[in-house]
Image (tube, rainbow, N blue to C red):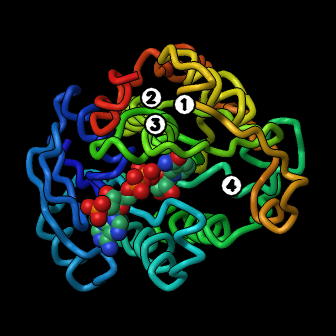
Amino acid sequence: MKILLTGASGLLGAAFAQAATRRGHNVIGMVGTFAGHIPGLAEKRSLDLTDETGATSAILEVFPDAIVNCAAVSEPARCEADPARAQALNVALPALLARLAHHLSARIIHLSSEQVFDGADTAPYAVKSTVNPINLYARQKVESERLVHAAAPGFAITLRIPLLTGNSLGGNRSLHERLFADWAAGRTPQVYTDEIRQPCTAANVADLMVELLERNDVRGVFHWAGAEALSRHELARRIRAHFKLNDTAAPLEPVSRAADPRAAAKRQASLALDLKPLAGTVKTPIETFDAQLDQLILPPACRAWYFSG
Ligand SMILES: NC(=O)c1ccc[n+]([C@@H]2O[C@H](COP(=O)([O-])OP(=O)(O)OC[C@H]3O[C@@H](n4cnc5c(N)ncnc54)[C@H](OP(=O)(O)O)[C@@H]3O)[C@@H](O)[C@H]2O)c1
């Protein structure tokens, strides 16, 4: 399959490039500013995807069998800092890609987030649970889902995914990479004891995306995540223990949502996901957190700090 991948330099896009290539697919990857090598890509193109005309002609020129959209402003704080750019990438771009997918009769996978839910319920959210976005990023994800499925109802899959673990190309993007960056710089990361997340690795989501693209019977909105819903504090503690670090070398500051109600108003408390109907019907395994830890590598920029201790 010829697959056009946006966001090929991101945490998930880079994982998808490798997963799809392992399965024999031909992946043409689009990046924004990333200049390095991306393993798994047959071809890399640099393009500002907020330029609708440029993006349209580049995609029509590739004429893909499938489009995978991993480009985004993927952090809520960055969306708040530049709402117009975030709107262009998180809403207008997926809508454009869906229109092009429909035009090309190509499958499209769009990535959404657990954050479409408000996090007030402690029970896992099902696909049909009511969305209630509480920050700009989440509102944009809800809007993007609606536009993607309106434009390409016969071709679109949206995956709502959780906080991702794994190894990014720059070594600075994922959960453990950010903890290491703080520790290596002598900072103490604050970690919520009362925010629950259900992470899985980017590589695991990538395997699922390839599996879904290879099946012809899947359309619609789905949930995917790991096997365990844990507090951010517990996640950080287990990452630290996995790398055999102690509280002196790698301190953590446990914090509670009550300490900063204004911040908490835009952060979801509990985002566990019900994985039906994918759970049990796909070959991709649901990862335990231990299985995720086994895949993490020491971020290259933090090696000197790690081995000096
Ligand atoms: N990471 C998570 O924990 C998480 C959780 C839930 C959902 N998601 C969703 O999953 C998807 C992938 O997330 P991710 O974490 O892999 O994202 P990411 O690491 O932040 O990567 C974002 C990608 O978008 C590209 N991009 C940004 N602006 C661009 C522009 N103007 N033109 C072209 N490309 C541009 C970046 O390219 P350059 O770097 O080359 O500029 C990069 O490849 C997103 O939809 C995100 O919202 C992620």
First in sequence: mark 4 vs mark 1? 4
Residue at the disc numbered 4: 115
Mark 4 near ligand 1 (CB under 8 Å)?
Answer: yes
Which residue position holds label 2? 204
Q: CA distance from mark 1 to mark 2?
A: 7 Å
Viewport quadrant of the C terminus: top left
Instruction: State the separation of the CA atoms marked 4 and 2.
Output: 19 Å
Instruction: Name the amino acid type tagged 1.
Output: Cys
Label 3 and label 4: CA atoms lie apart by 25 Å
Q: Where 265 sits versus 307, above or below?
A: below
- Amino acid type shown at disc 2: Asn
Could you tell me residue 121's position as x and y percent?
89, 45
Q: Amino acid under label 3?
A: Phe
Q: Earlier in the sequence, mark 2 or mark 3?
A: 3
Query: Ligand 1 is found in which quarter of the picture?
Result: bottom left
Q: Which mark is residue 200?
A: 1
Nearer to me, 193 or 49: 193
Q: Nearer the viewer, mark 1 or mark 3?
A: 3
Identify the residue position indicated by label 3 in the image: 180
Considering only vertical position in the picture, is 191 above or below 76? above
Question: Which residue sits at x=21%, y=59%?
Answer: 34
Q: How busy is the neighbourhood of tag 3: few (under 14 within 10 Å), some, or many (20 plus)?
A: many
